[in-house]
Image (cartoon, rainbow, N blue to C red):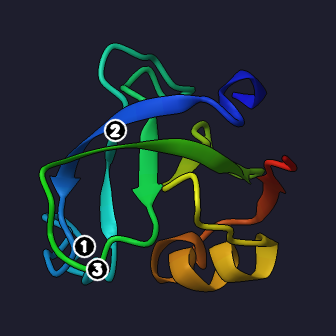
Amino acid sequence: MKEYLGREVKVKIDRPLGSKHPEYGFYYPLNYGYIPNTIGGDGEEIDAYVLGVHEPISQYRGKVIGIIQRKDDDEDKLVVAAEKNYYGKEAIKALTEFQERFFEIEIIVFDK
């Protein structure tokens, strides 16, 4: 996954801001989706959080600014934002806590 750090990617949003998880019912306070035509550790497309967009969207093109490595799960998550936005480890942790609190994680950020 580290090869994605700093790269521009397109995210297809399947859980827009304000939606609820179809199985667990929790609310998405940010846009969440996947990188088309990729394969993650769970055999599905690589998932991504989109930071800095405060309205529901269907797709997004931005820079991978971080990786959330789940130590107790098969899949890691990418963190994507606009080039001009910077989010450190603590900000990423706080913004993704709604879902990542259920896992033991390590956050890797892209240093310019």
Q: Earlier in the sequence, mark 3 or mark 2?
A: 2
Please identify, in this view, whether the residue under mark 1 or under mark 2 is nearer the observer.
2
Question: Label 2: how many residues lie within 10 Å, few (<14), some (14-19) or many (20+)?
Answer: many
Q: Residue at x 28, y 80 (%)?
A: 54
Question: Label 3: how many residues lie within 10 Å, few (<14), some (14-19) or many (20+)?
Answer: few
* 111 to the left or right of 50: right
Percent across and percent down for residue 74 are 61, 37
The foreground one among 46 and 82 is: 82
> On screen, 71 above or below 88?
above
**Gap in angstroms between the C-alphas marked 1 and 3:** 23 Å
The foreground one among 56 and 41 is: 56
Labelled disc at residue 34: 2
Q: Which residue is mark 1?
A: 24
Secondary structure of residue under mark 3:
loop
Q: Which residue type carries mark 3? A: His
The foreground one among 97 and 58 is: 58
Q: Earlier in the sequence, mark 1 or mark 3?
A: 1
Q: Earlier in the sequence, mark 1 or mark 2?
A: 1
* 103 to the left or right of 48: right
Q: Which residue is mark 3?
A: 54
Q: Residue at x 79, y 71 (%)?
A: 89
Q: Residue at x 13, y 64 (%)?
A: 22
> On screen, 70 above or below 52?
above
**Gap in angstroms between the C-alphas marked 3 and 2:** 18 Å
Q: Which residue type carries mark 2? A: Tyr
Q: Which residue type carries mark 1? A: Tyr
